[in-house]
Image: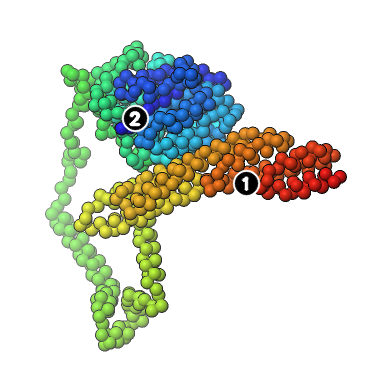
C-alpha cells in the first residue's frame, strides 16, 4: 500500500534577503490540514521553518544542507516506489544563468550557485525515486539579484519533461503576493480553501479552482494579477488519500478573517480579466486556464467567502437558500427592419431565371473544357488489361494526351530491386505518414508526451471504422518513436527524462517489454551516475590551486568511480588532467631552482596516469643535477 508523505518548507527570516511575513504560516497551515483533515500520518509530515523543532537529534532549520540531507535520508530509508509526496516551498526563488534555484535560509543572492538548491537536480532526484510527486512552489521574486531570466521558466520546462505534477504560485513574468490580513500568501490561501472545500481531490479540479480564486484575491486586495501555473502529467494521479476524498471539507473562516471581505450571498460572475489571463495548454504543459467554465457556478459558490462582493439585485437572483440564480435570458428579438419593402413577382422571376441560366452556362463550359480529360480517365482505367490494339489506340492519341496516360500507368519494378529495399521504402512511407498525422494534430515528434497523446487519440478509433488500420499502424510507429527518444536521452545521461518517456509506453504496445528492461537498466545506471557524480564533485571540491597535494587527494577520490559505470570516463579524464597539473607545478618549481620541492611534487603523480612516465623521467633528470 502506498504511503503519503509531505515536506512543507516556509522561510520568513532570511539572512541575506528581505524578510517575508507569511511563508512560515503557509507551511504550518498546509501541514496541519494534511494531518488533521486529509489523513496523512503525522510521522510522514515534516515541517522546516525558522522555528520548527528538531526531529530527534536532527535540526529542521531550513538550510541547504539540512534540506538536502533530509531528502537523501528519506529516499534511502523510507520512500517506496509509487509513494505519494507533497513537497511545498514558500520562500524566495532565483534564476541564475538560465537555471532555477530555491533559496534556503542562508541563501546568498551574490552566490546563487553555491548557496541555492538547484531545481533541476532536485526534480531529477525525485523522478529517480519513482514517487508520485506534487511540487507546490509559492515562490516570491527577489529584487536586485543576479537573475538572468524570470524564475519559473526552467521549472515549467523540467516539469513537462520529467512529467512531474507541479503548481507554481504565478507565471514566470508575474510576482507572488502575501497579505497580513489573510495571514498567508495569496496562492497558499487559495490552495487551503480549495482543499477544505473539496476542490482539490485531483489536479484538474485544483487547477480550475486556483486559476479562479487567486486572481480574485489580487483584485480584492488591489495587487497586480497573479495566475498560478499548473503542469499536469499525462499519467493521471490521485493527490489525496481515499479517506480525504470521501469526506466533506468545510471552509474554515479562521484562515480568512471576516473583516477582510465583503460578504455576499453570491459570488460575482467572472470578469474579463480572469478570462483573458487564462490560456488553455495541451496536457502536460503549463496551463493557467479557464477550463473550469463548466464548473464556474460551483467554484463561485465555494469560493464566495473569499472575495465575494455585493451585486445589484437587478443582475442576480437569490433564492431562500442563498444560491446564485441567474435571471432568465430575454427572448429572441428580430433585428430586421419592421417595414421591409415587398419585391414584385415579375422582378423575382427575372432574377431567378437569369441566375439559373448563368449557372447552366458555367456548367456547360466546364464540361466542354474537361471533356478530353474525362476520355483519358476512361482509357486509363482500362489500361492495365488493355490489348495490343488498345495500346495502339493510345499511341495514336495526341502527344499531350498520350504523355498524360504514360504518367498514370503503374511503374514496373526493375528485376534487380531487392525485396528488402521495397520493405524499407514501405516502412519509410508509413513512418512519414505517421509523422504527417502528428503534424495534423499539432503534436511534436520530439516530445514523448505528445506522442503518448497521439496514441491515446488513435486508440479511440474502433475496429471496423474506416481509419482503424491506419491508426493501429501509427500506434506501432509512435510507440517506437517514444522508445527511440528515451534511448537518446539515456545516452546523454538524462536518465530521469529517459525513464519518464519510456514509462509512457503501455502494456498494449509492442515495445513495452523492451521499454521495461531499459527502465530497469536506466534506474541502475542513473543511481550509479548520481553516486559517481557526487564522488567527482567531492574530488573537485578538494582542489586548491598551487597545492599539488590537493590534486593528489582529488585523484584518489576520483579513482573510486568503478570501471564500466556512468561517469568512469569523466573520472579518468579528470585524473589525467590533475596529474598534468601536478607535473606542471613540479616543472615550475624546478625552473625556480627548487629541485627538492620539484622532485617531491612530481612524486605525487600517481601510477597509471598519463603524466606518470613524464614525471618519473623528470625526477631522474633533476636528481642527476
Q: Mark yes or no: residue 309 visible.
A: no
Instruction: Name the spot of residue 131 as percent of width and height, x first.
Output: 38, 35
Q: Nearer the viewer, residue 43 or 248?
A: 43
Q: Nearer the viewer, residue 334 or 284?
A: 284
- Residue sitting at the far top: 259
In the image, taking residue 113 as reference, residue 78 lies left or right, namely left
Report the quarter where the N terminus lies: top left
Upstream in sequence: badge 1 or badge 2 = 2
Instruction: Name the spot of residue 51 as percent of width and height, x first.
Output: 47, 15
Q: Residues within 10 Å of mark 1 (few under 14, many from 20)?
A: some
Q: Residue at x 63, y 43 (%)?
A: 574
- Give the residue number, with chain letter if any, for mark 1: 573
- Residue sitting at the far right: 625
Examine the image and state in which quarter residue 194 appears. Answer: top left
In the image, taking residue 21 as reference, residue 508 lies left or right, namely left
- Give the residue number, with chain letter if any, for mark 2: 3
Q: Residue at x 34, y 23 (%)?
A: 41
Q: Mark yes or no: residue 201 visible.
A: yes
Report the quarter where the C terminus lies: top right
Instruction: Name the spot of residue 470 as percent of width and height, x first.
Output: 29, 58
Amino acid at each position: 500500500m502506498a504511503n503519503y508523505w509531505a515536506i512543507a518548507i516556509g522561510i520568513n527570516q532570511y539572512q541575506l534577503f528581505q524578510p517575508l511575513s507569511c511563508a512560515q504560516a503557509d507551511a504550518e497551515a498546509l501541514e496541519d490540514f494534511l494531518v488533521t483533515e486529509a489523513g496523512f500520518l503525522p510521522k510522514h509530515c515534516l515541517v522546516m521553518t525558522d522555528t520548527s523543532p528538531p526531529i530527534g537529534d536532527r535540526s529542521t532549520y531550513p538550510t541547504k544542507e539540512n534540506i538536502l540531507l533530509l531528502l537523501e535520508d528519506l529516499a534511502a530509508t523510507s520512500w517506496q516506489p509509487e509513494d505519494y509526496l507533497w513537497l511545498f516551498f514558500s520562500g524566495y526563488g532565483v534564476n541564475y544563468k538560465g537555471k532555477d534555484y530555491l533559496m534556503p535560509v542562508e541563501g546568498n543572492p551574490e552566490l546563487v550557485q553555491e548557496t541555492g538548491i538547484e531545481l533541476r537536480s532536485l526534480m531529477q532526484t525525485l523522478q529517480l525515486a519513482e514517487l508520485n510527486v506534487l511540487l507546490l512552489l509559492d515562490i516570491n521574486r527577489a529584487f536586485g539579484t543576479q537573475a538572468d531570466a524570470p524564475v519559473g521558466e526552467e521549472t515549467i520546462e523540467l516539469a513537462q519533461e520529467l512529467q512531474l505534477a507541479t503548481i507554481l504560485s504565478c507565471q514566470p513574468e508575474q510576482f507572488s503576493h502575501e497579505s497580513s490580513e489573510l495571514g498567508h500568501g495569496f496562492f497558499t490561501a487559495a490552495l487551503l480553501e480549495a482543499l477544505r472545500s473539496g476542490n482539490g481531490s485531483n489536479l484538474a479540479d485544483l487547477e480550475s479552482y486556483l486559476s479562479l480564486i487567486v486572481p480574485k484575491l489580487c483584485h480584492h486586495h488591489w495587487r497586480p494579477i497573479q495566475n498560478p501555473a499548473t503542469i499536469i502529467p499525462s499519467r493521471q494521479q490521485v493527490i489525496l488519500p481515499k479517506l480525504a476524498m470521501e469526506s466533506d471539507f468545510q471552509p474554515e473562516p479562521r484562515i480568512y478573517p471576516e473583516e477582510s471581505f465583503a460578504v455576499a450571498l453570491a459570488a460575482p460572475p467572472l470578469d474579463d480579466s480572469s478570462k483573458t489571463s487564462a490560456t488553455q495548454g495541451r496536457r502536460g504543459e503549463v496551463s493557467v486556464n479557464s477550463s473550469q467554465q463548466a464548473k464556474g457556478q460551483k467554484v463561485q459558490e465555494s469560493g464566495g467567502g473569499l472575495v465575494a462582493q455585493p451585486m445589484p439585485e437587478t443582475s442576480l437572483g437569490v433564492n431562500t437558500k442563498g444560491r446564485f440564480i441567474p435571471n432568465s435570458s430575454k427572448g429572441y428579438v428580430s433585428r430586421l427592419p419592421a417595414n421591409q419593402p415587398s419585391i414584385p413577382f415579375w422582378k423575382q422571376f427575372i432574377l431567378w431565371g437569369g441566375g439559373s441560366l448563368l449557372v447552366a452556362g458555367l456548367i456547360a463550359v466546364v464540361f466542354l473544357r474537361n471533356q478530353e480529360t474525362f476520355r483519358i480517365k476512361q482509357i486509363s482505367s482500362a489500361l492495365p488489361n488493355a490489348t495490343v490494339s488498345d495500346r495502339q489506340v493510345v499511341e495514336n492519341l495526341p502527344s499531350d494526351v498520350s504523355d498524360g496516360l504514360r504518367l498514370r500507368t503503374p511503374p514496373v519494378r526493375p528485376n534487380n530491386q531487392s525485396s528488402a529495399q521495397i520493405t524499407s521504402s514501405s516502412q519509410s512511407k508509413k513512418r512519414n505518414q505517421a509523422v504527417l498525422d502528428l503534424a495534423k494534430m499539432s503534436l511534436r515528434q520530439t516530445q514523448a508526451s505528445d506522442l503518448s497523446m497521439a496514441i491515446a487519440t488513435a486508440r479511440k478509433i474502433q475496429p471496423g471504422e474506416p481509419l482503424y488500420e491506419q491508426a493501429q499502424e501509427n500506434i506501432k510507429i509512435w510507440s517506437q518513436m517514444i522508445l527511440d527518444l528515451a534511448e537518446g536521452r539515456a545516452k546523454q545521461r538524462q536518465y530521469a527524462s529517459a525513464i519518464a518517456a519510456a514509462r509512457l509506453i503501455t502494456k498494449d504496445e509492442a515495445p513495452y517489454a523492451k521499454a521495461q528492461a531499459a527502465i530497469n537498466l536506466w534506474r541502475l545506471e542513473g543511481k550509479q551516475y548520481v553516486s559517481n557524480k557526487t564522488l567527482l564533485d567531492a574530488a573537485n571540491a578538494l582542489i586548491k590551486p598551487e597545492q599539488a597535494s590537493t590534486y593528489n587527494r582529488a585523484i584518489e577520490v576520483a579513482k573510486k568511480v568503478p570501471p564500466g559505470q556512468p561517469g568512469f570516463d569523466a573520472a579518468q579524464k579528470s585524473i589525467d588532467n590533475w596529474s598534468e597539473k601536478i607535473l606542471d607545478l613540479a616543472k615550475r618549481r624546478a625552473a625556480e631552482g627548487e629541485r627538492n620541492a620539484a622532485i617531491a611534487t612530481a612524486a605525487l603523480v600517481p601510477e597509471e596516469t598519463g603524466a606518470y612516465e613524464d614525471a618519473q623521467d623528470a625526477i631522474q633528470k633533476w636528481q642527476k643535477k
